[in-house]
Image: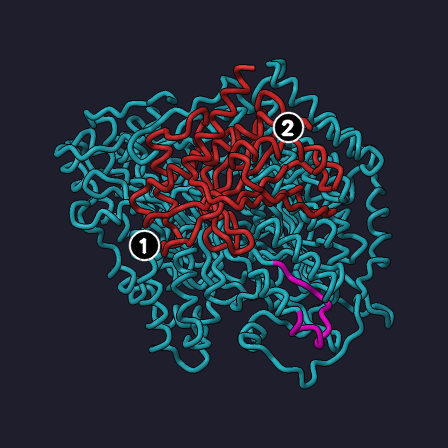
Chain colours: A cyan, B red
Amino acid sequence: MSSANWKEKLTDRIPPDQAREIDNFEAQMLLRKAGKIEEKVFAEVRLRRGTYGQRYDNGQRHDGIRTRALAYQPLTKGPETMWDAPGMQRIKIPFGGLNPDQMKLLAELAEEYSDNILHITTRQDIQLHFVHIEEVPTIFRRLAAAGITTKEACGNSVRNVTACPLAGICRTETFDVTPYAKATAYYLMGHPDTQQFGRKFKIAFSGCRHEACSLVSLHDLGGIAVTRQVDGKTQRGFELYVGGGLGAVPYQAKLMVEFLPEEELMPMARAIGRVFARLGEKKNRNRARLKFVVAKLGIDEFKRVVMEEYQSMPEDNSWRRYFDEIPRYDEQPAFAAVQLNGQKRPNGFEEWAATNVYEQRQSGYAAVTVTLPLGDLTSDQMRKLADIARKHAGDHLRTTVEQNILLRWVPHNRLINLYEDLKAIGLAQPGAGSIVDVVACPGTDTCKLGIAASRGLAAELRKRLATQMASMDQAIRSLRIKISGCFNSCGQHHIADIGFYGNSRNVGGYTVPHFQVMLGGKWTDNAGSYALAMGSVPSKRVPDLVTRLTDRYLADRQGEETFQSFCGRIGKKQLKGWVDEFVKVPAHAEDPAFYVDWGDPRAYTIGDMGTGECAGEVISLAQFGFTAAESQAFEAQLLLDDGEFQKADEMAYSAMLEAAKTLVRQQNPDTPTDTPTIVGEFRTRFVETQLFWDKYHGNQFANYLLNRHESPDTRYTKDTAHKLVEEANLFIDASHKCLAKLQASMNVLEVPVLPKV
Amino acid sequence: MDAYKLIVKIFVKDPPQLPADAFVPVFHSWIQNQLVADHLLIDVADYQLVHQGPGTVLVALEGNFSTDRADGRLGLQYNRKQPLAGSFADKLTAVLITTLEGCVRLEQEATLNGIRFGGDELVVRINDRLAAPNTKATFESIRGDLETLLAELYAGAPVELHHEPHAEKLLEVRIKSSQAVSTATLLERAKSLAALSAGN
């Protein structure tokens, strides 16, 4: 590898402190290679630099016929993570800000070290996949020389600070939040008070309250720009929100401070960080986000603790260095504004402009969204896009949380030429922010936690919807679809009109990819409300379900009713009825296509499933029980909607008990069905034996039932009931998985693990 | 020249009508049947929605195969990731052999509607800007090795080498022979050359 030479070549272009950190990373990498530091230690080191593992890096993969060992050398870079297995490198792009030189460098890195693809994430980061660990120090050095870092792109740290991509040019913003996002990102990066977190910490800034902006409600810490008049002068500040988050159980952030003066932003963020480090859970990762601290203390008590910390924390004036830069932040257009007058418009231009061009606040300028299918573009496209930006827009670009790139400051008279240039490199697709612009996390393509092919489904939906776009009603066009490969919500399915997250179901002894349907999430109002689960449908039926839902919306919509309002008016019973039309899975012999996922022809199985008659019987009995549990979980959702919070809580608890009973009776059909016995038996047979244990989430799902049983939250508020309803759905999902494990243990077929030929 | 990150692309001749995802099951079958010698085959990545992108990628530890569509021309591309033994000429020959073996294997795939690769055109790139900046000097430093290899491959028939220095792009040499040779023949000749080199 040529790392040493790049180091030599870039010596004068890397800030000394960054150079030392990268040297240190490289030294630790070499120590790990020599077996001189523990794999766990090196795993934490690399994760804090955004160097992740990828699917199959444990050295095992099902190839569609059998589970096969991948014969890597016997060296690891973390627990169950083989050294040579390709990994993912996440690159932090604070507030999504990029310039053309940086884009060209990123293009080079994707070409030389990845698979020639750059992937934009839902947090405005850029990811490279299939990267070898030994190339990573060189990647860091080349990035550092271009002013980019991967520091704290993963790990228990402050992740990429996001901001509205329209900040500074938006027609409705209070003021430009960009310099505040930038200052906060760099102030907190590596700060001693952010190094002892039990879990990640996400921050976002929005210029407006009512647009989607940067989705403040789903962040640990979020600021919405506000002003007030003090002694005749306008003072800038932020509405400060805390304790939001998606993940398995989503929480809406709570308003902590109605007006936080701008100069208090960074010290307050530090104080919140210190409280999180002190009070946040450290052992149980599944309860370790700030949202659990806020929920446990309540917002008033949390605010009191933070204010106390704010007053008493040791002095640290380093934030002033960043704060003093804020007034100097200035984005100037590269070209004078000239109106688009009478120029001939090429075919496709109007359609593209209708969805991809945003009229800036500054007269004569527009911002242009470059739509990237699934957030991907090639190195060549990125390089050429950098040239196009410089030719028509200048140096100020942004990545977006919808996995696109935004060119800002395009003079109107250049829009047509820009369109033609984008078209020449395949980046002039219309439909930005529309139903076609489907957002998806990596899912089973590369993510170790992926359960279903979120990208495969997104690609299929995109292809189908794109063909209908021209004749599509505007009401349908403006819907958003977001897909996650599992319940961890990286695809932000909770805030989509129509969202999906991957799970699986057992049918006749086979595992079938499914997606949980989430309807009625709210993208605007900074992710104003979350969708609720409507039940799971087989992956292969999702496109037809989308057609069904959009057809119904179009037919039954009243006036300008939004999809959220429509869902609310129609009611979940009716919506559930539409979803239920698509739940049936044909037998494997009848239609084996249901037993593979989108974009992946391998049989969807973990390789050790069988079709024994005994297992088949067990499954049918179990499915009966699970269906009852799912019905109860749905009833709980309806009760929640009706404001019957205590009843919703009790029904959700009952749903979990039903699923637990189903499992317990698989092992002992004579188990009495009273609650204490079911919970006790569940604990003995499934928790203590670790049959319910999840590789990545431990006892998280089991604890949903155990905690509700042992110490119910008797406040019965909307939040507590909503949380339990979500938990019940996840508990039922986990029960399905557990059943698959049970079936496997009863299966007489053994699938060989073959060595590499 | 000690670069080993070599890329070879061989173009499909008169591409047949194929569904966009036609290569996905093919590459999965290569993994199932362990069809690529000396490669630890890992996974298949599909980028069919990306304009003129890598198409379908067969990811291996040693190097990736992709059904590359750069410049709108479909071809099989092999991108070496791990070091190879021997001189630059040996490395280039080895990468060429791996690519040609992939082409021959695809030509035998029943599901690909008789796909054929043109043996009269190759692209060679060096995927290492530090070791091989895209300059005239770098090109001249590998020209001799290239010409020796091509003389064997095309049995002395005239061959044109086209190179354009570029500050940003990878070093790339486009090779065009006046002689149409099948990929099987090219593979046979490349293997003979490798055997001869190993004997020396």
For the residues beneath circles 1 and 2, the answer to whether they share a chain is yes
Name which quarter of the figure residue A391 lies in: bottom right
Give the mark toward the camera: 1 or 2.
2
Q: Tell me: A519 left or right of A346.
A: left
Of the residues shown, which amino acid type is indicated by label 2? Val
Mark 1, Cα crowd under 10 Å, few <14 / some 14-19 / many 20+, is some
Which label number is shown at residue A45? 2
Mark 1 belongs to chain: A
Secondary structure state at the residue bearing disc 2: helix
Residue at image x 32%, y 54%? Answer: A535
Q: Nearer the viewer, residue B138 or A412?
A: B138
Q: Is residue A13 above or below residue A3?
A: below
The image quadrant that residue B147 belongs to is top right
- Is residue A636 rendered to the left or right of residue A159? left
- Which residue corresponds to the image point at 66% horizontal and 61% vertical from the top-left? A165
Q: Position of residue A636 (x, y in %)?
A: 33, 55
Task: Residue at 38%, 59% (x, y): give it.
Answer: A640
Residue closest to the eye, A161 or A461? A461
Residue A719 position in % (x across, y down) = 47, 54
Does residue A710 show up? no
Residue B18 x %, y %:
36, 54
- Magenta region: A405-417
Query: Label 1 sits on what residue type?
Result: Gly
Mark 2, other Cα within 10 Å: few <14 / some 14–19 / many ≥20 = some
Residue of label 1:
A535
The x and y percentages for residue A291 are: 56, 46
- Spatial CA span between label 1 and label 2: 40 Å
**Residue drawn at (42%, 26%) of the image:** B37
